């Protein structure tokens, strides 16, 4: 069976909804040999390779054989070759000379140092990333690592998929982290013994101090520092889990319901690079240095 991706797929409700609908169409098909075609696709935001890759891995674990075909658009093909997504589908890797590329990676749940170095080298070291202190950079890294840790603790998945992209014309940088397994809705409702909607469960998990972890492990989704940074930076955060879509953008929160459930969690963080401010943690500001 051949399935076609849409002409334009971006990091927005419609883009996520389309990829998730594609997953369910393939999952429910009686055919086991599946071709995912980019023939109609003229724009595919590279960070969404993490979402597509995670879905393909899950489908293959369910007995489907997946191939990627007809990546005909030169720009799309070039980006997906440079970030490494198409390597698993017969394309040669291309040397990353461009600073716009953030590699597509699949991490084992115990690859802590590898993931930390990935965030440091591929994200925080980008020359156009907003200026920040060393300590704040460390805290941002720790917050993003908490997403990885959350996936390991709750997702019960085989791999954590991640990919990003710097969009120089739009002055933004996206990093997307995906785990398959348990959803936020399932984790929160099981922990609180309640029946929250997916969006409400995401909202609960984002509040500082809220956690479904037990024992001496603390933390929610691990986005408290990043949320404060994104608010000042005028960036964006999106969380997709089960049938819930949650987005923070420029002071406003939006929620929506997906057409089908996503059997895991997608976290997309978008940094505004058209930002000349310099950032540090409050505790780094000394009263002696104000004047």
Image: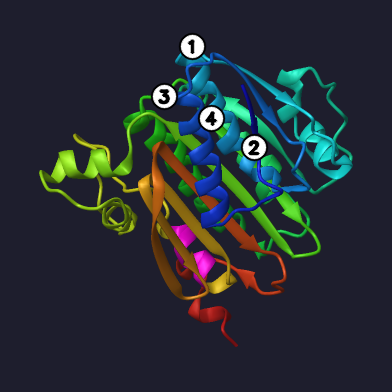
Find the magenta span and give its range.
225-231
Give the vertical position of 77 relative to 237 (above or below). above
Q: Quadrant of the N terminus?
A: top right
Image depth: mark 3 or mark 1 in front: 1
Sequence-wise, which precedes: disc 1 or disc 2?
2
Judging by the rendered image, the residue that carries numbered circle 2 is 49
Instruction: Point out which mark residue 91 bears.
Output: none
Judging by the rendered image, the residue that carries numbered circle 4 is 54
Sequence-wise, which precedes: disc 1 or disc 4?
4
Give the residue at x 51% y 56%. 13
- Are the residues tagged 2 and 3 within 8 Å (C-beta)? no
Secondary structure beneath disc 2?
helix
Left or right of 4 in this view: 51: left
Give the vertical position of 24 relative to 6 (above or below). above
Residue 81 in percent (x, y) is at 81, 31
Residue 9 in percent (x, y) is at 65, 49
Judging by the rendered image, the residue that carries numbered circle 1 is 63
Sequence-wise, which precedes: disc 3 or disc 1?
1
Between 55 and 47, the one lying in front of the other is: 55
Q: Is the stretch drawn in magenta largely helix, strand or loop?
A: helix
Q: Quadrant of the C terminus?
A: bottom right
Judging by the rendered image, the residue that carries numbered circle 3 is 157
Between 290 and 168, the one lying in front of the other is: 168
């Amino acid at each position: 069976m051949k399935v076609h991706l849409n002409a334009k797929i971006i990091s927005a409700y419609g883009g996520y909804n389309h990829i998730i609908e594609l997953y369910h169409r393939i999952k429910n098909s009686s055919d086991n040999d599946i071709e995912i075609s980019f023939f109609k696709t003229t724009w595919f935001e590279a960070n969404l390779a993490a979402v597509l890759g995670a879905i393909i891995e899950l489908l293959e674990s369910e007995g489907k054989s997946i191939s990627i075909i007809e990546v005909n658009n030169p720009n799309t093909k070039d980006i997906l070759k440079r970030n490494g997504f198409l390597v698993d589908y017969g394309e040669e890797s291309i040397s990353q000379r461009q600073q716009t590329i953030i590699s597509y990676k699949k991490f084992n749940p115990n690859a802590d140092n590898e993931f930390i170095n990935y965030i440091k080298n591929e994200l925080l070291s980008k020359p156009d990333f907003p200026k920040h202190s060393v300590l704040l950079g460390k805290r941002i890294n720790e917050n993003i690592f908490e997403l990885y840790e959350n996936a390991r603790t709750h997702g019960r998945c085989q791999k954590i998929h991640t990919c990003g992209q710097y969009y120089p014309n739009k002055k933004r940088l996206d990093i997307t982290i995906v785990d398959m397994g348990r959803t936020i809705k399932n984790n929160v409702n099981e922990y609180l013994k309640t029946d929250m909607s997916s969006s409400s469960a995401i909202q609960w998990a984002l509040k500082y101090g809220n956690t479904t972890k037990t024992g001496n492990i603390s933390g929610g989704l691990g986005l408290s520092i990043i949320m404060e940074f994104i608010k000042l930076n005028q960036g964006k955060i999106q969380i997709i889990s089960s049938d819930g879509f949650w987005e923070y953008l420029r002071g406003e929160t939006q929620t929506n319901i997906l057409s089908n459930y996503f059997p895991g969690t997608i976290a997309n963080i978008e940094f505004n690079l058209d930002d000349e401010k310099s950032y540090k943690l409050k505790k780094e500001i000394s009263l002696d240095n104000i004047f």
